[in-house]
Image (spheres, rainbow, N blue to C red):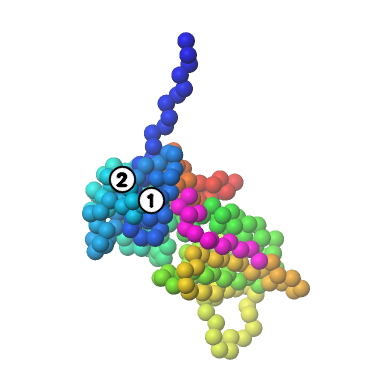
Amino acid sequence: MTATSPSAAPAIRVAIAGASGRMGRMLIEAVRASGDCVLAGALDIASSPAIGSDATAFLGVASGVPITADVRAGLANADVLIDFTRPEGTLEHLAVCAQVGVKAVIGTTGFTAEQKEAIAAAAQKTAVVFAPNMSVGVNVTLKLLDMAARALSTGYDIEVIEAHHRHKVDAPSGTALKMGEVIAQALGRDLKDCAVYAREGVTGERDPSTIGFATIRGGDIVGDHTVLFAGTGERIEISHKSSSRAGYAQGSLRAARFLAAHRTGLFDMFDVLGLND
């Protein structure tokens, strides 16, 4: 008698918000290329010319999944939503996710403190991975920054420099702010009390307890981040540079797989990657 192999786990049914945008299309391609995920929904704003079209038409193939502005319709067949849009849209989508039991991976940035509280409240009803950057490499970089900040806690000035494409609407980037938060926490500080976001004119000597930020916007830069620890006689730079959005998409799928084992709760990419230990 021949033994039979156990049946494969069902595919994770993924809906994509902002389906006709640059990141949305990258996510759709990643879902199609994966062996364990399937495209189950596609959302976009009502004014998008893509509304009603097939979500994979840009690839020259048909998926049978239309792009819709009806959030409930777009989530009807999904297990998880991946959302890289704008804060207001993401919160609208998340409210429906919480109502219908769809999990969420949120890579949107630019949330206010109050909006982040709304995300935490929704996570009491459904499982959410919320991170300012879904890239595996960026999150490993954050872990390295925590280690560096603890070792370089005195005698080093800390500056965060980030560069993004001309279309990015928030500054500093969510990733840069997360880097600052990780460093500040490692140093026993609160970022809102020690961050310096602009310098102009006669500023006086640098306060060694501050964390500085510099923002660059131009061209089609996907995302570059460098943290400079400047000491006496030496400088240490920890950098991450993205050449495409593919890393964000692959990290998002890892987050979606992670959520398969959770019904509720608020998680970040450190949870997904096991970096909280």
Q: Quadrant of residue 77?
A: top left
- Identity, as a three-letter code, of the amino acid under mark 2: Ser
Give the percent coordinates (x, y) of residue 173.
Answer: 48, 67
Residue at 51% in and 74% down: 216
Cβ–Cβ below 8 Å for labels 1 and 2? Answer: no
Residue at 54% in and 69% down: 162
**In the displayed image of the protein, which residue is found farthest to the front?**
60
Q: Is residue 253 above or below residue 202?
A: above
The answer to whether residue 109 of the structure is visible from this angle is yes
In the drawing, what numbered circle is on residue 190? none
Front in this rendered view, residue 127 or 137: 137
- Identity, as a three-letter code, of the amino acid under mark 1: Ile
Front in this rendered view, residue 238 or 6: 6
Return the disc, 1 or 2, that comes first in the chain's sequence: 1
Give the percent coordinates (x, y) of residue 128.
Answer: 40, 49
Residue at 41% in and 65% down: 110
Does residue 242 show up magenta in the picture? yes
Front in this rendered view, residue 97 or 74: 74
Front in this rendered view, residue 261 or 112: 261
Q: As drawn, is 128 to the left or to the right of 247?
A: left
Residue at 66% in and 60% down: 148
The CA distance from mark 1 to mark 2 is: 10 Å
Q: Residues within 10 Å of mark 2 (few under 14, many from 20)?
A: some
Does residue 171 show up magenta in the picture? no
The secondary element bearing badge 2 is classed as loop
Q: Which residue is mark 1?
A: 28
Span highlighted in magenta in the image: 237-250
Give the number of the mark in front: 1 or 2: 2
The answer to whether residue 188 of the structure is visible from this angle is no
Give the percent coordinates (x, y) of residue 245.
Answer: 47, 58
**In the displayed image of the protein, which residue is found farthest to the top?**
1
Q: Which residue is mark 2?
A: 63
